[in-house]
Image (cartoon, grey):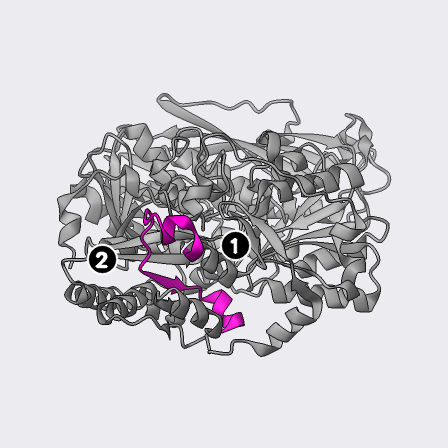
Amino acid sequence: MSAVVKRFPVRLDLRHGVIDMTHGSGGRAMAQLIEELFVRYLDNDLLRQANDQACFAVSAGRMVMSTDGHVISPLFFPGGDIGSLSVHGTLNDVAMSGARPLYLSAGFILEEGFPLADLDRLVASMARAATAAGVPVVTGDTKVVEKGKGDGVFITTTGVGLVPEGVDISGDHARPGDAILLSGCIGDHGVAIMSSRENLEFETSIESDSAALHELVADMVAAAPGIHCLRDPTRGGLATTLNELARQSGVGMVLQESAIPVKPEVLAACELLGLDPLYVANEGKLVCICPQQDAQRLLDAMQAHPLGRQAAMIGEVVEDRHGLVQMETGFGGSRVVDWLAGEQLPRIC
Amino acid sequence: MKYIEEFRQHDLAQQLSAAIRKAVKPDRSYHLMEFCGGHTHAIFRYGVQDLMPPNVKFVHGPGCPVCVLPIGRIDNAIALVERHDVILCTYGDVLRVPASGRRSLLKVKAAGADIRMVYSVRDALRIAQENPDRQVVFFAIGFETTTPPTAVAIRQAQAEGLGNFSVFCNHVLTPAAIQNILESPEVREMGSVSIDGFFGPSHVSSIIGSRPYEFFAEEFQKPVVIAGFEPLDVMQSALMLIRQLNEGRYEVENEYTRVVTREGNTKAQSLVAEVFELRRVFEWRGLGLVPYSALRLKEAYAALDAEKRFDTPAIAASDVKGCECPSILRGVKRPVDCKLFGTVCTPENPMGSCMVSSEGACAAYWSYGRFRRPETASRESVA
């Protein structure tokens, strides 16, 4: 038997217990929560040191850093939960520079009364996502807010990564003539979330596409280091992402609607709700803008990876000082694809 | 997904486009009004205008429920939540409609009022059941399509004796509005608006049938073709309207036969007739006071009528200065004719109701951006 005195005589009640204000007070209850829940799942050498920061060596070169707050409702949805999403979201933001993600941090804001069983479930999911990605959570923070002042749990994650030499990817690098590639079907995440919202339950087999894209990016960068832009079309969907890139680069775009992959079930749900899949969120897709001569090599590399199997070339960058994203519709007409205005709301009739 | 894709096929669209180009007489123009916002949206989303010859023009009508809602009714709703502390339930688009004093239900909600966006009137009933100590008002809005579900909810609330539920009724009627447009001086006398024929509503007609349009097709000698909301429906219906005009006919034809019958959904009609009665007059944004154009709860259901339970005086509120929504709703002006369009009025910050809903003409113009597109000669050669 261990000679060490047990620090916490009574274990956390992970089945029936709830978060209370003491879990954020900095005292023994918080220490126990960290040890028996966070460190238990997210365990690694750096986290175990229990410092207020993680200290690690860096190599020469360029680093990237990105942060993302996650406030999703519902916390658990088909294909994921806020835990895995908070890992994937930040890893992807880091990876969209072409970087290899190295470390993550996680800040939790917990609402008083939040069930420990749910927290246990989503921290476990977070740990699985981090382990699968090979990127450890090395430092963290926990705060508790009074009941009614949060929505169960908010998670902010920050990631750092290392950019391989010779890679220079940025939203302002798109040039007329470039090809626009998309890694797969759009709209899965948004439709999965909507299908599980309390007042809008409808039956669908759609699951969120939440996934870490850094390995796909590594394969792409290896195939063609001269990629101009990468971005993951999350909130606001593909349409908003392309508009951002067009504005940053001062170019226009022409898309082919028939080339944009959308699952029939997603299309059906969007019809039902009066939404446009171009504006529905994704959490495991990326847009790549590259010189035309690299396009086929990149498409091959993307399609060889499980997360890019349905990758397609969806359009072309054109000269346009207005920065318009236009689309040839599958129907034979054309239209402008604008930024998302406000929030997409279901229609009345 | 076959059932949708069938109505969006590129090849069929090209064939129809060629047929329309062949059918039109070069020495005249064809001004076709789509009454419904659903049609407006389809025309812009799929670029249907690109497939039409230059002498076929779409005139956008007032058939967008939030667009025609007068400001005073939104002011009434705001007063309900602020003065009577009710839980107000309504559909998403209504939240963004501008009210007096640059307010909207969305802003009032952000300031702390209990306003809930619902997807169905059933959600409002459930909220009333779950909050027995609060008054819950459902802000009912929409044309004939959304009226039957409201009627069902009212009957259910009555049957359950749900004392804390009531309905603020803003349901309006399509045929009355079309007739009003045709009787307006701009169309009848001044000739400043040219309307040669109508695309009849699709969802609305599934309830009321095609018969109600027969009167004014005859009376005003304008052809009507009930059209589905898919882009191929719109094109096929345009061809049918063009043929009628070429042959000097003015009949009610039905392109949307997969859903609409002459008699409509009689069960829904009788349900509506049981719960609602005609208002003698109702204010529409753009059209003004239109006789017998809206519904209210019958006396037997008066206990569930928010206008009787609470104080909802008629409020005469005027539109934002310079806003051309009223003229745009009558087809007299186009969104680009409005000084506010795209300057201070955008979907992010709508000054007028036509910029709110995706079915509104201004929002469709703005979002699908035709007016901003550099003119390219190649578009005219699509045939």
Mark 1 burial class by Cα count in 10 Å: few <14, some 14-19, many 20+: some
Q: Is residue B186 magenta?
A: yes
Chain letter belonging to callout 2: B
Q: Is residue A133 above or below residue A55?
A: below
User: Nearest the camera: A215 or A90?
Assistant: A90
Count the marks: 2
Q: Position of residue B117 (x, y in %)?
A: 64, 48
Q: Nearer the viewer, mark 1 or mark 2?
A: 2
Residue A188 as seen in the image, left or right of residue A123: left
Q: In percent of the image, x 28 and y 60: which residue is there?
A: A331
Report the disc number at residue A347. Answer: 1
Hey, which quadrant is residue B230 in on the image? bottom left
Report the disc number at residue B52. Answer: 2
Q: Is residue B217 above or below residue A20?
A: below
Q: Position of residue B137 (x, y in %)?
A: 73, 51
Element marked by disc 2: loop
Kindly indicate whether the residues beneath marks 1 and 2 are on one polypeptide chain: no
Asked if disc 1 and disc 2 are in contact, CB closer than 8 Å, the reply is no
User: Nearest the camera: B25 or A115?
Assistant: B25
Q: Which residues are magenta?
A: B182-209
Q: Amino acid at mark 2?
A: Met
Hey, which quadrant is residue B43 in on the image? bottom left
Q: Position of residue B86 (x, y in %)?
A: 77, 45
Q: In percent of the image, x 77 and y 25: which residue is there?
A: A26
Alpha carbons under labels 1 and 2: distance apart: 27 Å
Q: Is residue A108 above or below residue A84?
A: above
